[in-house]
Image: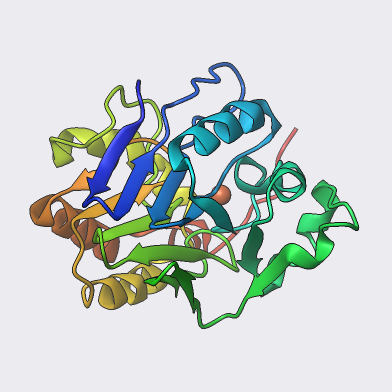
Amino acid sequence: MPNTVLFDDGTHRNVLLEDFGLGGLAIQANQHLIIHGGAAMILDPGGHKVYSKVLTQTLAIIGKAKLHYIFLSHQDPDIVAAVNGWLMTTDAEAYVSQLWIRFVPHFGIDHLVADRLKPIPDEGMFFKLDGASLVALPAHFLHSEGNFQLYDPVSKILYSGDLGASLGAKYSAVSDFDAHLPYMEGFHRRYMGSNKVMKAWADMVRGLDIEIIAPQHGAYFQGKDMVGRFIDWCANLQCGVDLICPKFRIPTA
Ligand code: FE
């Protein structure tokens, strides 16, 4: 799959990097770039298996622009494991929830770059990208306890991290929502916190103008109709503690 340009108005570009197709054990993961004028951001760059390929592609795509930010939606290894490499080879600052700021260094953060790992406050924050404004939206418990999504008002793309993730579908854009459900249902029922938090998220994002919802795994949702269907589906899903409770059982031999 080649790189997919999700938006390009000449000044502002949003690029989904090609699937580096790890196959085998490692889960498929998407990497996204946002370039505005002379500044760029990479979202959830991934782990060591893809690091050199993603870095090479990133530098080729951003050209003369400079990588300013590494956005980490949460603390999982498929997102942050190679962050030390990114900090060592670029001048970018990496941002992750304040909840994970002392956990991520366990992946190995060289003391020379440690001050460029920065916290995102619980309520979210804005990033300035050469004049463009991007917003980190709180999406805690979807699925991580300290979890953020990124909304880009120029391209109208909501980068949703693990929310919307699908596993095993052979296409990059969802064209049939109902046919897509089996690829994401099991993941969301277990990995997402609860229906209560799904509803809170749905209420928040319904206030945004969204053309694309782009998750970190699998296919993206394009167009108002598809975006609306996904948000409605989330708002009604029983998941996480809704299903795990009310009781655990001690395993029998
Ligand atoms: Fe995750």
Residue at the bottom extreme of this rendering: 123
Q: Is residue 84 left or right of residue 55?
A: right
Residue at the front extreme of this rendering: 64
Q: Quadrant of the C terminus?
A: top right
Query: Is residue 216 something one can see in this rendering?
Result: no
Q: Is residue 253 above or below residue 249?
A: above
Residue 133 location, x and y as percent?
38, 73
Residue 147 location, x and y as percent?
54, 65
The one nearer the camera, 211 or 189, is 211
Residue at the left extreme of this rendering: 225
Please report the residue visible at 20 percent of the width from the left and 37 percent of the height from the top.
Answer: 174
Q: Is residue 104 above or below residue 107?
A: below
The one nearer the camera, 240 or 39, is 39
The one nearer the camera, 187 or 18, is 18
Please report the residue visible at 28 percent of the width from the left and 70 percent of the height from the top.
Answer: 202
Q: Is residue 40 left or right of residue 249?
A: left
